[in-house]
Image (cartoon, rainbow, N blue to C red):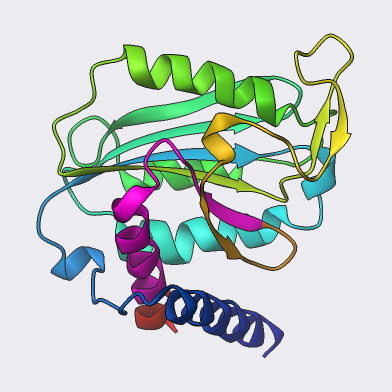
Amino acid sequence: MMKMQTYFKSFFSIVSIMMALGIGIQNAAADSRNGNMSLYLLIDRSLSMEQEIGSVKAYLEESVADCLLQTGDFVYALAFYGDTQFMLQGRIGSDISVDDLMRNVTELKANRHYTDIGSLLDSFERDFRSSAAPPTDHSYVLLLSDNYHEGPPDSPYPGKTHNLEHPLLVPRKEIPMEGWKISILGITVEEKAQQFAAEITAAWNQRN
C-alpha cells in the first residue's frame, strides 16, 4: 500500500508540473511510440542518496525499462559520486538488452563519498559533444539525484550546495520524486524536454 501511495503521489506531482507548464499529457509509452530515442542516464550513488536509491531503481525499472524503452533505442548509463562509474551503452536489441541495464542498476549502492555534480557535467558534456550521436529521433539527458552537490577539495567545484551553478543546469525541467529529482538537463532541454516530460508522465500513468 505504501509503495502504491508513493507511485500515485509521484504521478500527481508530475501531472501538476505539466499542467503548470501548459503541456498536454500524451500517450508516448514504448508500445505506442514511433521512432527511437537516445537516453543518457546520470545516476547519483553518493551517500546522500542512501535512502533514495531504492526509489531511483524502482523508477528505472517500472517507468523507464518496462514502459519507456523499446527495441532500437540507444541507452548510456553512468553512475557518479566524487568520481564517475561507467555502466553501459548501446542499442536495445542489438548491443544490450533492457535486462542488461537493470542488472547494472540493481547492483548500484549509494555508499560513495562526495557528489561532484559539476565535474560530472563537465566530463559528460565533453564526451557528449565530441562523440558521434547515434541516429535516433531524439536525445534526452536525465540527471537522477537529490541535487546535493558536495565537491571534494581538489574539484573545480569544491564545497557543498543545493544550488550548484552550471550551464547544463540552467535551464532544466525538474520532476520531484521522493527525496530526489528527475532533471532533464539543459543540453537537450528546449521543447523536446517538455515533450519528454509528458512521456515520463504517460509511462507512470500506464504502469499505475
185 relative to 119, above or below? below
- 183 part of magenta stretch: yes
22 and 91: which one is in front?
22
Q: Residue at x 69, y 58 (%)?
A: 180
Q: Position of residue 152 (x, y in %)?
A: 86, 19
Q: Residue at x 89, y 14 (%)?
A: 153
Q: Residue at x 35, y 18 (%)?
A: 129
- 14 part of magenta stretch: no
Q: Position of residue 145 (x, y in %)?
A: 66, 47
In screen coordinates, is 33 left or right of 156?
left
For the record, the magenta segment spans 181-203
Q: Position of residue 50 (x, y in %)?
A: 81, 49
115 relative to 169, above or below? above
26 relative to 36, above or below? below
Quadrant position of the C terminus in the picture: bottom left
**In which quadrant of the rendered view does residue 195 lie?**
bottom left
111 and 119: which one is in front?
119
In screen coordinates, is 124 left or right of 48?
left
Quadrant position of the N terminus in the picture: bottom right
**In which quadrant of the rendered view does residue 130 lie?**
top left
**In which quadrant of the rendered view does residue 203 lie?**
bottom left
In screen coordinates, is 36 left or right of 10?
left
Q: Residue at x 57, y 86 (%)?
A: 8
Q: Main secondary structure of the magenta part?
A: helix
13 and 170: which one is in front?
170
Q: Position of residue 93 (x, y in %)?
A: 19, 41
